[in-house]
Every structure is written in structure tokens, then in C-alpha cells.
Amino acid sequence: MRDTLSLIPRGRFPSIRRRSASTVQANLGYRCNQTCQHCHVNAGPHREEVMARDTLTLLMQFVRASGARVLDLTGGAPELNPGFRELVAEARAAGLEVIDRCNLTVLEEPGQENLAEFLAAHQVHVVASLPCYLEDNVDRQRGKGVFETSLRGLARLNSLGYGTALTLDLVFNPQGPSLPPPQAGLERDYRQMLGDRYGIVFSRLLTLANMPIQRFGSMLASQGRFGEYMALLREAHREENLDAVMCRDLVSVDWQGYLFDCDFNQMLGLPLRRAGQSRSHLRDVVGQSFAELPIIVRDHCYGCTAGQGSSCGGALAEGEEPGAQGEKPRAQGDLHAAESVGV
Ligand code: SF4
Ligand code: SF4
């Protein structure tokens, strides 16, 4: 895979600063039951990077002292971290909203038979990867049978109240170098397809733009389309999205406990800068404020402000509906890569 950081210009994205952190997003490690080819962290069953117990303890100390209201767990498959359930229980007992970025197939992994019940019992907000509502597309990208396993997972979550009493969000982003279609319209399509065909319900569909980094950026570079996609993002920049980009209110923590402005910067190796330090660890920042710190930006940040905007919580603004630009799923070869946020 090519180094995409060196391809990304430094200087044109506007300067922005942090507010206080309302969300802490933690990567619990790169272990995963799947080995999707497009995975931006190259996760898989044989990866050994897992957030250790002492780091999990520090993480909770940090979250409690930060005043954050949301703990957002990602990976790999975060549920495969041996400390996942303890962490979730502790965070929920402390009154935090907990988000689990779940790939759905993990619900059928050995040892995870009661994971869905655990999530429901702790009222965890599930953000689930369903790359498309078309079986062929999902199976081609993620492996034969993954669509069916994912639907079984969704049905099980539905039976526990997810999608009605409990929050179950699905994530879409385009396969190709184009902006996502308007979120509201695609959500209607997802509801109709999944509801009519399979009886599946969900809370919201979150549409994300592809970031020109890691595997996606590398693929564009190898096709000679990196500059073209960067230009598309820059030209679609909307100034009003700057106020809502997720890094203003979120701190990202890697599996070793180091801090970043967001998951994308984490994957690019661009640490959060504080007090002149080249990088900061959880152990050094418990109880410290991040408000007003400058955010490390490069031109990949246009991926967050282009068009309707994009964040781990989906679009930042309403997209245009009729005739809007954007890539909707099609049969044969149009997929998404929800895992760009570690789903
Ligand atoms: S893309 Fe998601 S499900 Fe696939 S290997 Fe990576 S973390 Fe696991
Ligand atoms: S890529 Fe990260 S740092 Fe840049 S605007 Fe988006 S969230 Fe902020």
C-alpha cells in the first residue's frame, strides 16, 4: 500500500480549533473475525495489537475526567478485546452513552453467542456495517455468506428492540471516487429494501464520504485518480460544514493510548498536538482540557466538509434531493466501505 500522507497537500484547508471533547472514540485493537480486502487498518484474526487492560483503565479515567458524554468503540472488531464488556459496563454505569461499531458477523463468533443480549442489556448504541442492501455486492466485497450472516445479526438485534426501542444505525459510503448521495433519500431506499425483503428495521442510515487515505487513497493513486478526487472534495467544500466537523468535539485514542484529533488522522499518523508535545498519551492528559487547541489539518479534511459533509455520525447537513450528485448502490460492483471508520 502506498504512503498517502505524502500525497496530501498541507496548506489549503482552513485552520480550526477544538471545543471541549464531548466524545472519546477509542480503537480497541486490530483483531477482527473478518479480513476484508479494503480494511484501512488491515485488521484480521491474526493481528495482535489489542488495547491492554492498563490502557483500558487509563481510558476510563480519562473519559470520566474529560466530561465527555459518549464513548465510541471501534477496531478491528472492538468486541474481541477481552476487556470490552467490562469497559462497556463501567462506562454505562458512569452514565455514558456507549457506541459499538459492530461488523454484525462478530455476533456469531465462538464466545460471542450472547453478545447481542449483552449490548441490549446495557443499551449500547450499535452502529453496524451493512455495505449494501444488495446481497451480491456485500458478498463480493466481504466474502460469501457475509450478507446472510449480517441479516441474521440485524434480525437478532431487531428482536431485542434494536431499531425501535434501542438505537441501531447503519453506515454507507460510496465505493468509488464520488460523494455520497443525499442521506435522507438513500435512507428511504435502505428502509424499503431491507424492510420489504427481509423485515429489518433500523434507526438511521449514516452516509460517509471516502477519505483519500490509506487503502482507498492508495487505490486512487495507483489508478492515477488521486488528484482528481482531491479536486472534487475541494470544489465541493462548504464553509458552513466547518463548524460541525467531528474533530471539534471528539478525541480519538489509538490501541496504545495515544491521542489524535480524529480516526483519519490516527490512520495517517498525525497525532494531536498539545503543549508543544509531538504526541500525547492518556497517562499525561487525564483531567486536561483540549478546548481551543488547534486541530492538525491537511487537505484530506475536505472529505469532511464536501457537499452535505461527513462524520462518524453521518452527513453534517441536508443534501440536495432531486438530481443530486452522488453514488447510489447498484447491482454489480457498487459497494461501500463503512470500515473507513472502523465499523
Ligand atoms: S473492514 Fe471492518 S470487518 Fe473488515 S476486517 Fe476491517 S475492521 Fe474487520
Ligand atoms: S479529517 Fe479529521 S481533522 Fe480533518 S476535518 Fe475531518 S475530522 Fe477534522
Image (cartoon, rainbow, N blue to C red):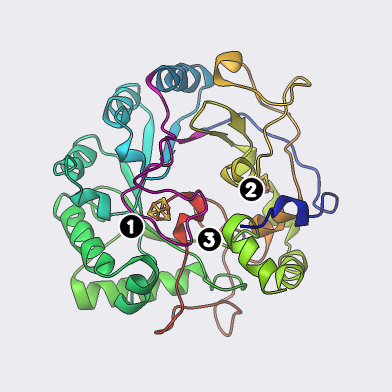
Query: In this orientation, which residue lies closer to the viewer: 54 or 261?
Result: 54
Query: Camera-side residue: 213 or 230?
Result: 213
Q: Which mark is residue 203?
A: 1
**Quick check: is the Cβ at mark 2 less than 8 Å away from ligand 2?**
yes
Residue at 47% from the left image edge and 63% from the top image edge: 337
Q: Measuring 29% from the left and 30% from the top, which residue is drawn there?
A: 82
| Residue 32 covered by magenta stretch | yes
Q: Which mark is residue 245?
A: 2
**Which of the two discs, 3 and 1, labels the residue nearer the N terminus?**
1
Asked if residue 287 can be seen in this view, the reply is no
Of marks 3 and 1, the one in the foreground: 3
In the rendered structure, the answer to whether residue 144 lies left or right of residue 127 reads left
Q: Which residues are magenta?
A: 24-53
Does label 1 point to a residue whose CB lies under 8 Å from ligand 1?
Answer: no
* Badge count: 3
Q: What x and y, as percent, mark residue 105?
A: 26, 55
